[in-house]
Image (spheres, rainbow, N blue to C red):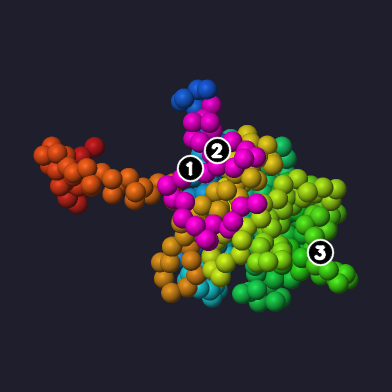
C-alpha cells in the first residue's frame, strides 16, 4: 500500500511501481527509432483554466509517450474553483474534426470525456463503431454543476450509446454509484465489483473506480470486472481538493494502452503518473489545486543547489548569464 501523493514530494524521483515497468520513453518506443508515437484521439471540452478538459488530456497523453488527436466538443466557462457554464459544439463540427484526423492518421486508442450533448455522444459512438478493435476509454466526471434535466438526458444517451462501445469506464465511486446504481438497496456502499457488474450489464467489460472510501482516512482505486478485482491501489486521504484528477488518470491510461501495455500494467502506471502529478500539483488561482502533469520536465532543485555550491567556471558563468535562446524581433523571422 502506498501513501497518497498529497503527503510527500517526489518530483526528482522517476515513476516506479513494483507491479509494472517504469513509464520510460525508451521502453515505449519501438525498435525503429524513427517510428511515430501511437495516436490517441480524445473527445473533450476546452477548459480555459487549464485544470481539466482537453488541456489535461493533451498533457497526460503526451507525457505517456503518445500523440494526442484532440477533438474539441465544446467549451467550459469556468475557473479553478467551479464550472459556471458550458457551450457545446454541434455534432457536425465534432464529426468533421474527428473524421479529418482519422482519415490521415491511424489511431491506437480513443478517449471520451465530457462531450456536452446527447447529439455529440451519438456522433462519437457512430465514429467508434468504425474502430471496433481500438480500445475506447470513457471518463464520467461529476456533473453536479449542470442543470438536472441536462444531466439526465446526457447520462441516458451515454448509457445507451457510448457504454456499449466502451472498453474501460473510469469514474469516481460516488459518481458511478449514483449513475449506474441509483436504486442501490443495501446498507453498505456498493463495491467496485458491484459497479462493474452494473457497467457490464450495459456492455462495459472493465471499470476503474476511483476514490472508494476506506477506514482510517484511506481511499482505494480499483480496476474490476463483475467476477474479480484485477488491480487496486490504496492512497492516504489528505485534506486537498484537486481539479482535473480524473481527466489526468483516464488520459494517461488511454495513452498507455495505445502504447501496448496490458490493462493491469497500464492501470498501475496511470495511477503512479496521477500520484506524481498530484504530488507536484500547484495553486495557480484562488480555487482548487491543479495537477502538474509535466512534473517530469521540472528541474531537480537538489541538483541545481549542488551545481550552485560547486560554483561556476568563467566559461560556465558566461554561458549561464545569457538566455538559453533568443527570439528574433517581431516580423524578422526568415524562412
Q: Is residue 207 visible?
A: yes
Relative to the observer, which residue lies in front, 261 or 200? 261
For numbered disc 1, what is the local secondary structure?
loop
Cα–Cα gap, marks 3 and 2? 33 Å
Relative to the observer, which residue lies in front, 131 or 174? 174
Q: Residue at x 34, y 49 (%)?
A: 302
Q: Position of residue 7 (x, y in %)?
A: 52, 61
Q: Which residues are magenta?
A: 1-30
Disc 1 to disc 2: CB gap under 8 Å: yes
Q: Which residue is mark 2?
A: 22
Q: Indicate left or right for 223 with 282 as reference.
A: right
Instruction: Say whether residue 2 is magenta.
Output: yes
Earlier residue among tags 1 and 2: 1
Look at the picture and state if 148 lies above or below 283.
below
Disc 3 to disc 2: CB gap under 8 Å: no
Q: Indicate left or right for 26 with 139 as reference.
A: left
Instruction: Say whether residue 142 is magenta.
Output: no
Q: Position of residue 297 (x, y in %)?
A: 40, 46
- Answer few, some or many: residues within 10 Å of disc 2's Cα (few below 14, many 20 plus, some between 14 and 19): some
- Answer few, some or many: residues within 10 Å of disc 3's Cα (few below 14, many 20 plus, some between 14 and 19): some
Cα–Cα gap, marks 3 and 1? 35 Å
- Nearest to the eye among marks 3 and 1: give it: 1
Residue 190, disc = 3
Q: Which residue is mark 1?
A: 14
Q: Position of residue 59 (x, y in %)?
A: 48, 50
Q: Residue at x 71, y 75 (%)?
A: 149
- Location of residue 240 (image quadrant): bottom right
Relative to the observer, which residue lies in front, 103 or 264? 264
Q: Is residue 109 visible?
A: no
Cα–Cα gap, marks 1 and 2? 8 Å
Residue 117, disc = none
Secondary structure, magenta segment, majority class: loop
Amino acid at each position: 500500500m502506498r501513501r497518497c501523493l498529497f503527503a510527500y514530494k517526489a518530483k526528482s524521483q522517476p515513476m516506479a511501481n513494483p507491479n509494472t515497468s517504469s513509464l520510460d520513453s525508451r521502453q515505449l518506443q519501438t525498435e525503429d527509432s524513427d517510428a511515430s508515437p501511437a495516436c490517441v484521439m480524445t473527445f473533450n471540452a476546452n477548459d480555459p483554466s487549464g485544470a481539466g478538459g482537453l488541456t489535461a488530456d493533451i498533457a497526460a497523453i503526451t507525457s505517456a509517450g503518445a500523440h494526442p488527436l484532440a477533438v474539441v466538443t465544446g467549451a467550459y466557462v469556468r475557473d479553478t474553483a467551479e464550472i459556471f457554464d458550458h457551450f457545446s459544439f454541434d455534432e457536425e463540427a465534432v464529426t468533421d474534426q474527428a473524421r479529418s484526423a482519422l482519415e490521415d492518421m491511424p489511431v491506437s486508442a480513443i478517449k471520451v470525456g465530457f462531450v456536452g450533448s446527447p447529439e455529440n455522444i451519438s456522433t462519437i459512438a457512430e465514429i467508434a463503431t468504425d474502430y471496433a478493435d481500438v480500445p475506447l476509454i470513457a471518463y464520467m466526471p461529476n456533473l453536479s454543476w449542470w442543470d438536472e434535466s441536462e444531466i439526465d438526458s446526457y447520462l441516458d444517451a451515454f448509457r445507451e450509446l457510448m457504454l456499449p462501445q466502451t472498453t474501460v469506464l473510469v469514474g469516481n465511486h460516488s459518481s458511478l454509484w449514483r449513475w449506474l446504481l441509483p436504486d442501490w438497496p443495501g446498507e453498505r456502499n456498493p463495491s467496485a465489483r458491484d459497479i462493474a457488474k452494473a457497467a457490464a450489464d450495459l456492455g462495459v467489460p472493465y471499470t476503474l473506480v476511483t476514490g472508494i472510501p476506506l477506514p482510517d482516512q484511506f481511499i482505494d482505486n480499483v480496476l474490476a470486472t463483475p467476477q474479480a478485482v484485477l488491480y487496486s491501489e490504496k492512497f492516504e486521504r489528505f485534506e486537498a481538493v484537486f481539479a482535473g484528477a480524473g481527466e489526468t488518470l483516464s488520459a494517461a491510461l488511454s495513452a498507455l494502452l495505445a502504447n501496448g501495455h496490458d490493462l493491469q500494467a497500464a492501470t498501475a502506471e496511470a495511477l503512479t503518473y496521477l500520484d506524481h502529478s498530484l504530488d507536484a500539483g500547484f495553486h495557480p488561482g484562488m480555487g482548487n489545486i491543479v495537477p502538474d502533469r509535466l512534473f517530469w520536465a521540472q528541474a531537480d532543485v537538489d541538483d541545481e543547489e549542488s551545481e550552485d555550491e560547486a560554483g561556476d567556471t568563467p566559461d560556465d558563468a558566461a554561458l549561464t548569464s545569457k538566455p538559453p535562446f533568443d527570439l528574433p524581433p517581431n516580423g524578422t523571422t526568415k524562412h
